[in-house]
Each structure stands twice: as structure tokens, then as C-alpha cells.
Image (tube, rainbow, N blue to C red):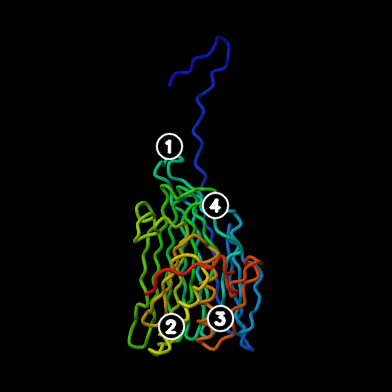
Amino acid sequence: MVSISSPGAPVCPPAAAAAPLPAWHGTARLRFLAAAGGRTTHQGAATAPLKLQRASPQADGRCELPLLHTAGGLVGGDRLSVELALEPGSRALLTSVAAQKVYGTVGRSRRAPQGSWARHDLRVGGGEGSDLEWLPQELVLYADGLFEQHTQVELAAGASFLGAEVVRLGRSAAGETLRGGRWRSSLAIRRQLAEGPRWELVDRLELAGEALESAHGMAGAPVFGSLVWAAPGPLAGEALAALLAECRAARQGLPGAMVCGALEQGVVARYRGPSSQAARHWFTRIWALTRRQRGLPPPELPRVWPFQERPFAPAPPDRAVAPEGSC
């Protein structure tokens, strides 16, 4: 490259291209232990941008612990890793302080026009008789955002895992769609038994492109939700049938398509529709049913959840929408 300057003027070298900002990898590693009096305590630490909030005990002695993502959102290349180890007999409820935002990267950079992925990894080890409820708040994937999550759960005999998620594909309130963005999820739950390991669930999903509009995909709906409960023990046929019937009845008054079905030892539920609140309310009602199935106290909504939420209240008649589908 040749620089041209007037006589006597200093020759300035061409400006260097700005270096890309480094990706941020936040981690949280936690261990939960059963303590005296039926309470569960925790040990561990987190690195920026993840931060542990103050833990508090629930009525059944469960440790309620919110995780805060201080960066205000994820961009391409960012990664969050959470590792949870539950000692035998421990109980924990983990949630997030606020909705997680994932910003768009597809077509935003000449250096990487295909975009960059943000990633969340969750690894869970549940000891015998442990009980984990993993209930983060909503994830909002902006237009052209790329996000993938990988969840691996290892359970001992008698351990329970309840996990739920709600994803909004584009800021639909502003008329935004996902466009060239993609959302990927990989979930694997395996139980270690005396006779050897058994897979409870292997679930892989991707929402993008044609799947956003297809009748067999999202059918144009902006909100997807998924809940899975790996029960601590086998459910008798009649008990499982009754639980599924109650889960389906819990859809009453909520807009969207909601279906649920049985696992070999648990249940799985899906939501597709216009409302992240409806998905949260249905999943919260199912959460309460799984608690009752085990003879546990009803759920206490985490203190960081939206204060105006009333998931157990029926919808007003003018808002009631018949749920779609069942399986």
C-alpha cells in the first residue's frame, strides 16, 4: 500500500484493523451437601461474568440459589459453564436472576459473516436420593443470534432432576423474527444403577430456517418451551396416567400448543405458542404436580422471579384459549 502526503508533512502508516474482542468464558462450580435438620448447604465459586447470589433455604430445606450473569447478554464466542454436584440426600433449586439475552452475529462482521456461536454448558452429578430443580428464566435470542446449549445429567438411584427452559426466538414484541439465527439444544440424562447405566433421555433439537414456519416445527410461533422430569423411582402405571392427565388439565386457560408424554421413569412436556408467560405458568403447574407426587411441599416461587406472576391463578374468561393437541 502507498501513502501519499504533501511535502514536509509526516507520513502516517495506514490504520491497523481493530482486533476482535476476546470471548468471555464464565464458570460456576458448586457442590450441595445435606446438613443437619434436613437443610442443604452449598460450596463453590463463580468467575466473571457469572456471580452467585445469596442462597436461602426453602420449606423442605432445599437450597435456593440464583445465578447472575453480570455482562447483560451473550455475544458470539461467549461461553458459560456450570457444574453442579449434589451429594446424597441434598436438595437444590437453581434459577437465573433475569432473562438471558443473546445478540445477533450473522452478517454483522466482514471477518466472520457466518456469525459466531454463544454457548452454555451444564453438567450435573446427582448422588443417591438427591433432588435438583434447574429452572432458569427465559432466554431471548435476538435476530441473527446463534446459541447452543449442552446439558449432561448423571443420576444415581433415587435421584431426581427437574429441568425447564423457555426460549423466545426474536424480539417479537418489536416485530423481530429470528431471521438467520439458530438455536440448538442437546440434553442427555443417564442413570447409574446396580445393573449398569440406563439412558433416561437423549434429546437434540435445532430451531432455524424452515423449522420456524413448518407445521411440524414452530408454525410461526415465537416461543418454545421444554420441561423434563426424571423421577427418583418408577411410577406405577395408574399413577403415571393420573399425573399426565393432571399435566394436560393444567393447560386450561393458557394460549399455545402444549403436549406431554411419559418417559420410562418421568415425564416430558413441550410448549409452542405466543407467550413466554403461558409457558412458564404451565411448567410451574407441572412442577407443583411433581412435588405433590413425591409428597413434598408446594413450590415456593424464587424471590428473583417476576413479582407479578400468578401461575396458579386461572386465566380470565376473555383470555382463555383452548389448549391444542395432546399426546
Residue 211 drawn above or below residue 1: below
Q: Quadrant of the C terminus?
A: bottom left
C-alpha span from label 3 to label 4: 37 Å
Circle 1: element type:
loop
**Residue 302 percent across, percent down from the top left:** 62, 72
Give the camera-side residue of 261 and 99: 261
Give the camera-side residue of 209 and 274: 274
C-alpha span from label 2 to label 1: 48 Å
The mark nearer the N terminus, 4 or 2, is 2
Give the camera-side residue of 71 and 299: 299
Label ID, residue 173: 4
Determine which residue is flagged by label 1. Answer: 110
Q: From the image, state whether disc 3 or disc 4 is nearer to you.
A: 4
Q: From the image, state whether disc 4 or disc 2 is nearer to you.
A: 4
The mark nearer the N terminus, 2 or 1, is 1
Amino acid carrying label 3: it is Arg
Residue 79 drawn above or below residue 10: below
Residue sitting farthest toward the front = 318
Determine which residue is flagged by label 3. Answer: 91
Circle 3: element type:
strand
Determine which residue is flagged by label 2. Answer: 156
Amino acid carrying label 4: it is Ala
